[in-house]
Image (tube, rainbow, N blue to C red):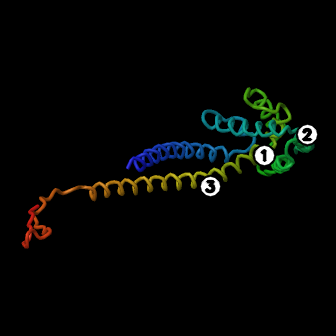
Amino acid sequence: GLRLLAFLFLAGVVFTLLCITAIASTLYLSRVKAINELNSPQLNALTGRNQSTYRFLRQAYGEIYDTAECSGGIASFLSGKPSFTEIECKESKAIAKTLNGWLNADDSSAITAVSFSICVVQAGLDDEFKGGIPAANAWCGSNTTVIKLVDRWSLGILIALWIITAFVLIVGIANCVLVSGNKKKGKVIAVEKPQGVVYGQPVHGGVQVVRV
């Protein structure tokens, strides 16, 4: 009926949106994987779409830092190795704990005082990056760690997204088959009604016969 057709239309729209999202996410994941293979100095030299992906992650970090009203994460270099002040967030201790856990957690980042300074300057030049210099310091001390985590999470999310997309497609196909089957069953075959004999009440001792 109309409800089933409306459901099929909605399922088609949802499938289309999911398919577009899944394809876009697949392309996005490939870029995350590409920058995940780079160390901190190499991230400063990104170009093109990989740079756009990196900027998106940096802006997301700045948004979290700023929204939670965080402070700290300022770096200082002693003997070529960075150390950071503790990050504190007024809105959430859990966020502060997470951000502190990301700071300087990647031993393979190959971060140097020079590459760190360039990273901070680049973040400061990004008009959409929030949190100012403190957030830029915290990001540049965490960028490779954050990218590794996003790469890991994105794969799981992408797999789930494709599974959901496939499920919606299967449901849509199953309902199409159901509608087709119902239409076949609903066909009416006209058959001439045979004449019959109906016996009525006796009339004057006889039998009244009525043909139909």
Q: Residues within 10 Å of mark 1 (few under 14, many from 20)?
A: some
* Image mark for residue 76: 2
Q: Which amino acid lies under the numbered mark 2 shown in the image of this protein?
A: Ser
Q: Identify residue type, mark 1.
A: Ala
Q: Earlier in the sequence, mark 2 or mark 3?
A: 2
Looking at the picture, tell me which residue is in the foreground, 193 or 130.
Answer: 193
Identify residue for label 1: 110
Q: Circle 1 — which element?
A: loop
Marks 3, 1: nearer the viewer: 3
Give the distance between the C-alpha atoms of the residues marked 1 and 2, in whole angstroms. 16 Å
Of callouts 1 and 2, which one flags the residue occurring earlier in the amino acid sequence? 2
Residue shown at 45% from the left, 48% from the top: 7
| Label 1 vs label 2, nearer the camera | 2
Asked if residue 83 is positioned above or below residue 206 in the image, the reply reads above
Along the line of sight, the residue nearer the viewer: 69 or 115:
69
Secondary element at image label 3: helix
182 w.r.t. 92: above or below: below
The residue that mark 3 highlights is 156
Image depth: mark 2 or mark 3 in front:
3
